[in-house]
């Protein structure tokens, strides 16, 4: 009996994990480059691993892929149109700033440490003097009351765009809380962009960007990331590959199941149709026999009348 309980519990745990895997990959697939969402976040292999544990958050976001390695992997798994998109000066940051200037939209920055955010905003202002920066602050929010104050400030400033760099999943949670408060602007997560920008707006040397060596440059500049790239990235790659395989198996089985249901339904409809046809045919035969009988009686009566004459 004890063995049965253990096996049953293990099976339930496997089913639960399988469901989580399917849900995460479905959220990722459904929201990849989903322009209908007004909140945008960026996933690399490491943040994908974190997203698996906070998957409900990410169904509210337009998901873009940050990291050339992840892009290559996704292309192998069939996402042929995916491109690297990141909130930094080599990708989307200049596009967002240029659009904000063009449409006179205000921007609020939140993230990194207190003094670093000052330097980052100073560098951004120097490069984009016409950018309407309506406010900024560090990303170290102590409690819910302080967060409510930040959200209220963003609302009062009628901010159009919020750039949030707190790290996954804190930055996604903040933008989602902001959106749930009734704010209707555009939100972007930016990871370490503000931290990197504090030293130099153009964080990556041009040749590093052209050769797609950004990851190696970050390890050189921020050695604490070495473990992430050489330990967590390979493990995240295994996790994503497993998720993708299980999801594709699930989709295939679901397609087979739906096809069988459709076939069974068609079979039932055909059987019902055959029954109806048989009933109609039987009724028609009875009516035919009745008409033939009446015709014979009329003929016999006619012959009888002729004989009497």
Image: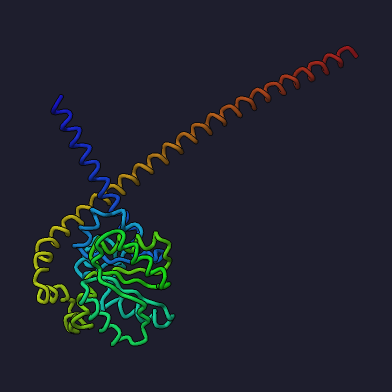
Q: Residue at x 21, y 58 (%)?
A: 50
At a point 36% along the width and 59% down the height, the residue shown is 60
Question: Which residue is pictured at 35% across the width and 68% down the height?
Answer: 187
Asked which colour scheme the image uses, the reply is rainbow
Closer to the camera in the image, 205 or 192: 192
Quadrant of the rendering where the C terminus is positioned: top right
Asked if 137 appears above or below 56 in the picture, the reply is below
Where in the figure is residue 252, as x and y percent of width and height?
A: 30, 48
Q: Quadrant of the N terminus?
A: top left
In front here: 188 or 205? 188
Q: Residue furthest top?
A: 308
Residue 300 location (% of width, % of height): 79, 16
Quarter of the image where one finds residue 112: bottom left
**Residue 197 rendering spot, x and y as whole percentages:** 22, 79
- Compared across the picture, whether 98 is left or right of 138 comes to right
Determine which quarter of the picture holds residue 178: bottom left
């Amino acid at each position: 009996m004890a063995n049965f309980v253990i096996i049953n519990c293990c099976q339930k745990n496997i089913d639960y994990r399988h469901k989580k895997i399917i849900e995460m990959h479905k959220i990722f697939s459904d929201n990849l480059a989903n322009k209908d969402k007004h909140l945008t976040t960026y996933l690399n292999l490491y943040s994908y691993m974190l997203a698996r544990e906070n998957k409900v958050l990410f169904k509210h976001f337009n998901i873009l892929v940050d990291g050339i390695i992840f892009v290559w992997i996704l292309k192998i798994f069939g996402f042929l149109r995916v491109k690297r998109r990141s909130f930094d000066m080599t990708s989307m940051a200049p596009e967002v700033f240029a659009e904000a200037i063009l449409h006179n939209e205000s921007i609020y920055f939140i993230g990194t440490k207190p003094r670093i955010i000052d330097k980052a905003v100073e560098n951004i202002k120097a490069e984009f003097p016409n950018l309407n920066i309506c406010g900024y602050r560090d990303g170290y929010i102590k409690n819910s009351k302080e967060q409510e104050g930040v959200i209220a400030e963003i609302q009062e400033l009628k901010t159009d765009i919020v750039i949030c760099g707190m790290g996954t999943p804190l930055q996604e949670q903040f933008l989602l809380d902001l959106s749930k408060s009734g704010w209707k602007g555009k939100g972007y997560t930016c990871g370490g962009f503000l931290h990197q920008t504090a030293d130099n707006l153009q964080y990556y040397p041009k040749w590093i960007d052209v050769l797609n060596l950004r990851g190696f440059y970050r390890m050189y500049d921020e050695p604490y990331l070495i473990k992430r790239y050489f330990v967590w990235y390979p493990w995240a790659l295994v996790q994503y590959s497993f998720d993708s395989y299980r999801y594709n198996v699930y989709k295939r089985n679901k397609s087979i199941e739906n096809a069988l249901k459709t076939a069974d339904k068609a079979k039932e409809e055909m059987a019902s149709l055959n029954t109806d046809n048989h009933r109609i045919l039987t009724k028609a035969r009875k009516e035919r026999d009745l008409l033939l009988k009446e015709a014979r009686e009329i003929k016999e009566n006619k012959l009888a009348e002729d004989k009497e004459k």
